[in-house]
Image (cartoon, rainbow, N blue to C red):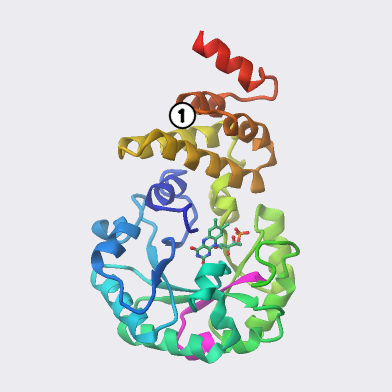
Amino acid sequence: MDGVTDATTRAAITSIFEGRCGVSVCATEFVRVTGQPVVAKVLLRSCPELRHGGTTPSGVPVFVQLLGSDPAAMATTAHTAVALGAPGIDLNFGCPAKTVNAHDGGATLLKAPERITRVTAAVRSVVPPELPVSVKVRIGWDGPEALAAIADAAQRGGATWLTVHARTRTQLYRPPVHWAELARAREAVSIPVVANGDLVDEASVRACARKSGCSAFMIGRAALGAPDLFARLRGFVGAPLADDDLATLIARWLDGLEAQGRPADAVLRRLKQWLRLAVFSRPTFADRFDRVKRCASLPLARLALAESGVAHEPPRARIRVLCA
Ligand SMILES: Cc1cc2nc3c(=O)[nH]c(=O)nc-3n(C[C@H](O)[C@H](O)[C@H](O)COP(=O)(O)O)c2cc1C
């Protein structure tokens, strides 16, 4: 996820349960390809894992995610990524951001499925057949009617699998999520269709499987609040990760960001972002988020993160005590 799941975060999320995290594949944040192909230096910045075999430290493959509409530039960039060792390429035709769409990228291509075929085919033609090219879309621009054509377009372009976020572009991230509509894609193609959108726990994944008929899932935001969900779905672990254990994982991730020499205020912003997203799948983190979001410094925020339970002093009082 753009601005969220950089290499440090990918490493943290896939580090749980000592390599049995349950994640099959990660994708980088999207790399925008506008007109000119993207050079190796930029790809290595987005995907430093390319220097280490294209996997997270726990061994999960990291696909390089490309966003753009120019078939030639996308293909050249994919070729560079593969030459650097990318284990796969993920193509983003789902991004709803206004600036991205205004520059003819992301979900804009849902309005003309044949363009999805052209970009996918161009990329497929330069990626060795044994490496996957996955495609990500939404159910449509402003309705699901074209989803079968969109899925077929991805398949005709040679996509290895298709991930569908069960919302339209015009919905952005607003409810409801339309899991049942994913059946339109599944019935239109023979490649696997991966379901995405609002999968926050085992119950929601089961409900999505029932309504969509899908048996593969992509989890975005809930990876921050429930990084254990992947392993639980696979039956690797039973009990859910405790709040304090997630706080410990986040604290280790903060150590990693600080060790890279990132400025404290930038690290603090990232911490607040992680906690805001964590509440989506872990409502019990609302208190922690509330405390942390009022902290003006990273050391205070670290204390607020470590603090468990609901009985706590109001943050302002605590700040005064700490400064005394
Ligand atoms: C902050 C943020 C950044 C995102 N960045 C990307 C991205 O770079 N590429 C992508 O395909 N989807 C991106 N998404 C969409 C997610 O991958 C996913 O489709 C969406 O959040 C719904 O799934 P979820 O409910 O599991 O999060 C982003 C979502 C959020 C909230």
Residue at screen point 64% across, 82% down:
185
Which residues are drawn in magenta? 153-167
Number of numbered markers: 1
Q: Is residue 99 visible?
A: yes
Residue at screen point 54% across, 74% down:
101
Secondary element under disc 1, as helix, strand or loop, is helix
Q: Is residue 160 magenta-colored?
A: yes
Task: Check disc 1 and give the amino acid type.
Answer: Leu
Residue that carries the numbered disc 1 in the rendered image: 298
- 189 or 10, which is in the foreground? 10
Residue 321, horizontal then vertical, whole percent: 56, 10
Q: Quadrant of residue 255?
A: top left
Residue 77, horizontal then vertical, whole percent: 31, 75
From the viewer's perspective, is residue 75 above or below residue 55? below
Residue 6, horizontal then vertical, whole percent: 41, 53
Q: Is residue 148 magenta-colored?
A: no
From the viewer's perspective, is residue 127 above or below residue 176? below
Residue 182 in the figure: left or right of residue 150 = right
Q: Quadrant of residue 27?
A: bottom left
Residue 15 in the figure: left or right of residue 176 = left
Q: Is residue 237 visible?
A: no
Residue 109 in the figure: left or right of residue 203 = left
Residue at screen point 69% across, 41% down:
283
Residue at screen point 31% across, 84% down:
126
From the viewer's perspective, is residue 243 above or below residue 71? above
- 244 or 98, which is in the foreground? 98
* Ligand 1 closer than 8 Å to label 1 CB: no
Residue 36, horizontal then vertical, whole percent: 31, 77
From the viewer's perspective, is residue 208 above or below residue 287? below
Q: Where in the image, quadrant-wise, is ligand 1 located?
A: bottom right
Q: Dot 1, how many residues are within 10 Å of its Cα: few (below 14), some (14-19), or many (20+)?
A: some
